[in-house]
Image (cartoon, rainbow, N blue to C red):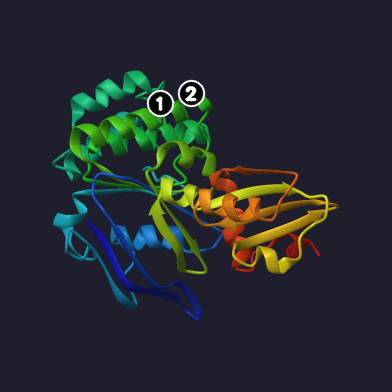
Amino acid sequence: MIKAVNLTKKFGNKTAIDGLNVEIKDGCIYGLVGSNGSGKSTFLRLLSGVYYEDGGSISIDGYSVWNNPQMKKQIFYLPDTPYFFKNASLKEMAAFYEGLYESFDMDRFKSLSEIFPISLTDRIENMSKGMQRQAALLLALSVNPKYLFLDEAFDGLDPVMRGVLKQLLIDSIEKTGLTVIIASHNLRELEDLCDHIALIHSGRLIFSDNIYSVKSNIHKVQAAYKTVPPQVKLAGLKILKCERTGSLLQMVVSGDGEEIMAKINATEPLFAELVEPTLEEIFIYEMEAEGYDIKNMLA
């Protein structure tokens, strides 16, 4: 299990991670979303032992990763810009990782190389961004880590290869209990893949929950009225956002869907419906609540 307690990381006067607390159970696909510069990549680097925390603690299975070679052998961290040795081929990189990780499975590497359409002998640095990403993912999966940390895993992948990656991750979890953390801006990909999701903003954790709970607790509501009721009649609702167009109210409301509709129907609308928002819409609503509002940014 991964656990962060009051985790803090600073770079000069900038606080990248600010007292973050989170627990991530084994065997899940955990999505990490947030605004640019929110601290997602810093969190993954702290988890991987690339950075050392300035405050609090971060551990995996009860152990710190920093300066811990045995723990690092169970981890594979793939940054947003994959690194390869200069002039190296995929075959040469595989040989390097085979010597570095006891868990590296050369048979799996050969099997995956038939799925990923990549040359084993061409220089990786001459490949396209998407092909380099595929090469890095192929190596990561061949390592058979216990913990796999991916920063922008889908960046540069075409729709077919994104689907292949999702299935390979799911298969690995079922077979080995792999734990995956994916930091990404592609919320639609995470929505289809992750069972848990967390939102980070300004180095702080806004929420962390299973994706069903996140999506079932926030709703879009449309209600049309002959006469729009006064605000006091809607006071029992936890309204995150409300826009009025004539006699139509469009709201974002937090809470149980049935209870929300019961309270809306009590205001006698001509028409009312409740719609489950996408993960992308939830992200926008939560970020607006934190003051990260596109309307204000463009004003």
Question: In the figure, is residue 142 to the left or right of 205?
Answer: left
Q: Residue at x 33, y 34 (%)?
A: 169
Q: Which residue is mark 2?
A: 160
Q: 3 and 119: which one is in front?
A: 3
- The residue at the point 30 percent across, 39 percent down is 140
Vertical arrangement, residue 273 with respect to residue 289, above or below: above
In which image quadrant can residue 99 be found?
top left
The outermost residue toward the top is 114
**Neighbour class for label 2 at 10 Å: few (<14), some, many (≥20)?**
few
Residue 21, given in percent of the width and then of the height, sits at 35, 69
**Residue found at the far bottom of this picture:** 13
Q: Which residue is mark 1?
A: 164
Which amino acid is tagged 2? Answer: Val
- What is the quadrant of residue 208 in the picture? bottom left
Q: Amino acid at mark 1?
A: Val
Q: Tags 1 and 2 in contact by the CB under 8 Å rule?
A: yes
Q: Position of residue 50 (x, y in %)?
A: 32, 61
Name the quadrant of the N terminus.
bottom left
SS for dot 2: helix
- Asked whether, in this view, residue 96 is left or right of residue 86, the answer is left
Percent across and percent down for residue 28 are 30, 45
Query: What residue is rendered at 86% in x and 52% in y?
Result: 246
- Dot 1 lies on which element? helix
Query: For residue 58, which quarter of the picture?
Result: bottom left
Image disc number at residue 80: none
Q: Quadrant of the C terminus?
A: bottom right
Total marks in image: 2
Marks 1 and 2 sit apart, C-alpha to C-alpha, by 6 Å
Q: Nearer the viewer, residue 104 or 20?
A: 20
- Identify which residue, 257 or 170, lies in the foreground: 257
